[in-house]
Amino acid sequence: MKNSKKNKKQSLDTTVFNKKTITSGILSIFSSGPQKELNYKQVSAMLFVTESNDRTLVAKVLDELVAAGSLKETSKGKYKLKSKTGYVVGEIDMNKSGNAFVISDDISDDIFIPFTNLNSAMHGDTVKVSLYARRKGSRIEGEVVEIIKRATLRFVGTIEKSGSYAFLVPDNVKMVYDIFIPGDNLNGAKDGEKVIVEITEWHKKSKNPTGKVVEVLGKPGENEVEMHAILAEFGLPYKFSDDIEKAAAKINDKITQYDYETREDFRDVPTFTIDPVDAKDFDDALSFEKTSNGNFIIGVHIADVSNYIPEGSDLDKEAYERATSVYLVDRVVPMLPERLSNFLCSLRPDEEKLCFSVILEMTEKAEVVEYRIVKTIIKSNRRFSYEEAQNILDTGVGDFSEELKKLNELAKILRSERFKTGAFNFEHFEVKFNLNEQGVPTGVYFKESGESNNLIEEFMLLANRKAAEMFGKSKSPKEMVYRVHAEPNMEKLESFSGFIGRFGYSIDMSNNLALAKSMNNIVKEVYGKPEQNIIENLAVRAMSKAIYTTKNIGHYGLAFDHYTHFTSPIRRYPDVLVHRLLFDYIRKKNPDTTGLETKTKHCSYMEQQASLAERASIKYKQVEFMQDKVGQIFEGVISGVTEWGFFVQLKDNACEGLVHMRTLNDDFYVYNAEDYCISGTYTKKCYQLGGVVSVKIIGVNLQKKQIDFELSYLELK
């Protein structure tokens, strides 16, 4: 018993205290005893806070919770829960059953909200939640008392008519309410058609919201309809208005005499682009020169998009609203109209183009002696695909072979240095499809990065870093848009550490550098093994998400103190903002930065929506690919475990489906969340995350993007 107490004390001593963990702890203490009156010393002792700085933070958080209305100060320095409940603000995360959790920055634990306490809140909504008194050992529960902001009022689904009215059955399984549509709000939609519906009202006494059809997409199952439906589901456009197309058509495509006189001329310097084989928007190019002192002048040339879309113009407003290009399985939905993205701003070979460039002087050891950021004119000599460039690197034969070889050598040094200083090396394979003319997948393959990809990546990273440092590293840094990545959540890391320990792996969390090195070693060790994809995915989930902001906290994953996005203004609006800021600062002009942080938040949100849409399109094509394979047997890896069964990712094509608990009829199985497994009560058979199994496809539902498996005990041939 003594040893147990000692271990517990040691564990508490290593707790990382910050505002979030202390807020969570304080709310838990007061919620578990609504009648308690405690001072900051008592609270500190209950949280095992001993350091002076942490105790000061406890006092500060207590005062903030009083101001927020969660606590009240009953007498000088004494605090109590303001009512029977505390309040937090967070975002609704709905599950298929209709119950939900609220994820809040105010508290580390997720708050369970039963369906009856949602009070019409929907997935993604920002809500105010009343916390119930917490019983010892139980989870935190609450009730939605206010909807602060709706995530969306538009939903995609299928019309089900019934007499003079209809319902929309939403595609998104996390939208658990069908939407009632009066007959005069159908807008010509027919039974069984896929549509976009907007909620118009929701009476408190009604179980379902009322809506109207705002767009008829067409017949379910058709490729165009389904891709447009995915874009609509995440609030993303799929076409430009006529006015925007006309505005793009009016842009003058001539390079002026003023441009020739005021920009640095790189037209005679060896220059080339390296992009995916099917790319049409080439927004970056590299130039290469050797100097008389043995150093190298390397130009990272980026399309000067801001030159063509004046701030505040209709084109600029449209680009801001979109904030990013969207990459679905079968198409790109660009941020800019095609005339800009594929022609005026695309660095196509043998065409003079306007650029904003980072010009680097580097030594043989890849040290940056000096750099400058300037407006330029370039003329690309060659357009390489990644595969073409890789072939030249492998054989040493081809256009610009010497330049590519030297750039690759420098890139390898830059890459090695990044990892030495604590950068993470997560390299996921991409799932790609062979599609026929109708967009139907005929094959699945995996695409991995080679040296040519890494070459471009390293110089883009370097340019982004230098762009962030130019005015952000000075004693009086100027306002800038940064790409930041916070340190990982320790609870998630500890959970990840516990899981990988079952496979014989471990991570060193003693400091940031040790953590990065041990994570990178695991990536190497798991390569090619059944558990590779599971462990890599869980490692990424343990990390924080990178976002855009004006508040620089550095980029943890890249191990950079200053980092921004400068190199892709054709497809990312934050890069356009960075170009404008840098150009103003270089000209010693003070830019108007009003509302800049709000713009960064919008860009971060749209980036997330685009990523979700991309994943949804991949999932749809995977399910579509498996439609004609019902009854076939595949080998896969258990990729997720829940109380209703476990998910399996197939090795051959990365398609994922569910083995439902009800199909496991050889025993009574119980879900064990702590051990990431489902185990048999009598046989003790265990189906654990990362385990290899054979499964038979028993059902495919394209509408719901779902594949159903059952275990197969037949030998795979």
Image: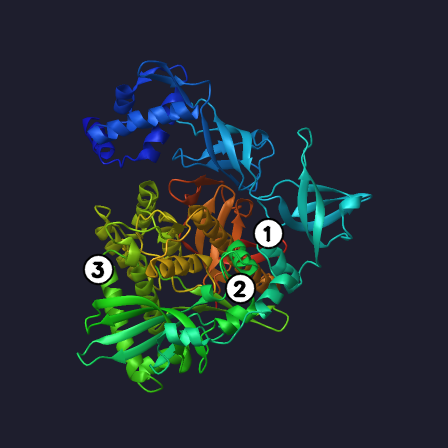
In the image, what residue occupies the spot 77% across and 53% down? 190
Q: Mark 2 or mark 3, which has the lower sequence index?
A: 2
Residue that mark 3 sits on: 420
Secondary element at tag 1: helix
Nearer the observer, 363 or 46: 363
Looking at the rendered image, the disc whose residue lies closer to the viewer, 2 or 1, is 2
Amino acid beneath label 1: Glu
Gap in angstroms between the C-alphas marked 3 and 1: 42 Å
Residue that mark 2 sits on: 336
Q: Is residue 86 left or right of residue 184?
A: left
Q: Position of residue 311 (x, y in %)?
A: 49, 58
Q: Position of residue 614 (x, y in %)?
A: 52, 59
Looking at the rendered image, the disc whose residue lies closer to the viewer, 2 or 3, is 2
- Is 88 located above or below residue 275 in the figure? above
Amino acid beneath label 3: Lys
Q: Mark 3 or mark 1, which has the lower sequence index?
A: 1
Residue that mark 1 sits on: 233
